[in-house]
Amino acid sequence: MSQKYKYKALTHSGDKVSDYLFAVDESAARSELKKQSLIVVSVELDAEKSFFSNKKNASASDVEQSTNQLATLLENGLRINDALEVLIDTAPSEALGKVWHEVFIDVQAGTPLYKSLQKYPELFDVLYLEMTNIAENTGTLPAVFRSLADNLAFQRDLKSKTIQALTYPLIIFMVCLCAVFAIFNFVIPNMESIFTSATELPGYTQWLLESSRFVSQNNLLIFILMAGFVLTLITLWRQESTRQTLIQWISVMPLLGGMIDKAEQIRFSSAMTLTLQSGLNLSESLALSIKTLNSAVNKQQLELAKIKVDAGSPLAESLSSSYFLDRISLSLIKVGEQSGTLDSSFAEVTRRSKTNFESWMIKLTSLLEPLLILIMGGIVGGVVVVMLLSIVSVNDISL
């Protein structure tokens, strides 16, 4: 495995040189510098920013930023080898820098860029890989990487808006949990002495006291179970089979199901825009765009539509039977088919879908906020009412 070394050297004319290079070990680094006719002064592992010191994995945002840099370098006339070499040092994270280093080595050895990127499916999806393959074969790497960068930025913005819209309801839910835990751990135990003199307590009072004892005695267990539940969901989401099952469950929910459908529509239409603008025919564009979807149900519906298109049916008519897009979007696609501007039509569908999604997310957030406040108030208020009724019942019994 290569590591990042910092070196200081002198040229034959006496000029000082200080830079970084990648090598298997220090000996290999010194040998590489000697091949460059440099007089080595010092070579040391980059301890301050070691190539492997950052444990963080590369994120989608890192890939988007590097793709944007790669597009800029290629647009300015750099060869792919030189552009990749620049990306090694300018990568947003050390993890992605390592990936670009390995890709650079493969490309230098004659491996196609598409094949090199294929080794990292967790970073580069099917659309990214296929578009790279097409760009290599057609000699349009700068334009394709610019389109990929724009598409990744669009997807990142979409994800960011979704998370932002759901953050406030999640905070309210967490506050509700904390309030309930505080009542059961601190308030009710301090009031328990009030009920010790009573010979017979109402059922709701006994339930309240027993629940408080259980929570206060098993705080650690409850936190472990909650953390285990969250980790289990994350683990299941990362597995393709279970992720499909979870998506199907979520898709039938009244509110979250609509969010998934709208996000899928945006993902499909933006992929169609990108592939059509790159010169792919309709059948190839459909095949690639379908692969970008997460829902197996939507994939099956669009696969049926693709079969109809391959058999000669118009695209808008074929998509109408899948109930995947609304009537306005289908009308735009129909106009694009007739005028030969399908890429522009799908770009407009993407813009409309994004606007509708943002509007829908605002409505969802506006609905969730009072709903969660009501639930929070009901839970906390219900516990308080039970406490008050318990105190009143004790006073009645003593009288």
Image (cartoon, grey):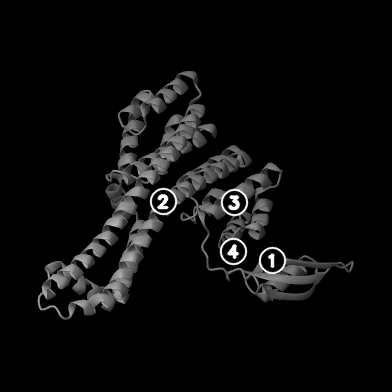
For label 1, the SS is strand
Along the polypeptide, which appears first: circle 2 or circle 1?
A: 1
> Of tags 1 and 3, which is closer to the observer?
3
Task: Give the residue at mark 2.
Answer: 166
Along the polypeptide, which appears first: circle 2 or circle 4?
A: 4
Residue 216, given in percent of the width and then of the height, sits at 28, 76
Dot 3: few (<14), some (14–19), or many (≥20) neighbours within 10 Å? some
Task: Give the residue at mark 4.
Answer: 94
Task: Give the residue at mark 3.
Answer: 65
Which residue shows up at 56% across the image and 63% down it? Answer: 95
Along the polypeptide, which appears first: circle 2 or circle 3?
A: 3
Along the polypeptide, which appears first: circle 4 or circle 1?
A: 1
Decide: marks 4, 1 in contact (CB < 8 A)? no
Amino acid at the residue labelled 1: Leu
Q: CA distance from mark 2 to mark 1?
A: 44 Å
Vertical arrangement, residue 297 with respect to residue 323, above or below: below
Decide: marks 1, 3 in contact (CB < 8 A)? no
Along the polypeptide, which appears first: circle 1 or circle 3?
A: 1
Q: Where the C terminus falls, by quadrant?
A: bottom left
Amino acid at the residue labelled 4: Glu
Task: Give the residue at mark 1.
Answer: 21
For label 2, the SS is helix
Name the one closer to the observer, 276 or 37: 276
Residue 148, given in percent of the width and then of the height, sits at 55, 43
Q: Where the N terminus falls, by quadrant?
A: bottom right
For label 3, the SS is helix
Q: Is residue 209 left or right of residue 43?
A: left
> Of tags 2 and 4, which is closer to the observer?
2
Name the one closer to the observer, 101 or 252: 252
Amino acid at the residue labelled 2: Leu
Q: Is residue 80 left or right of residue 278?
A: right
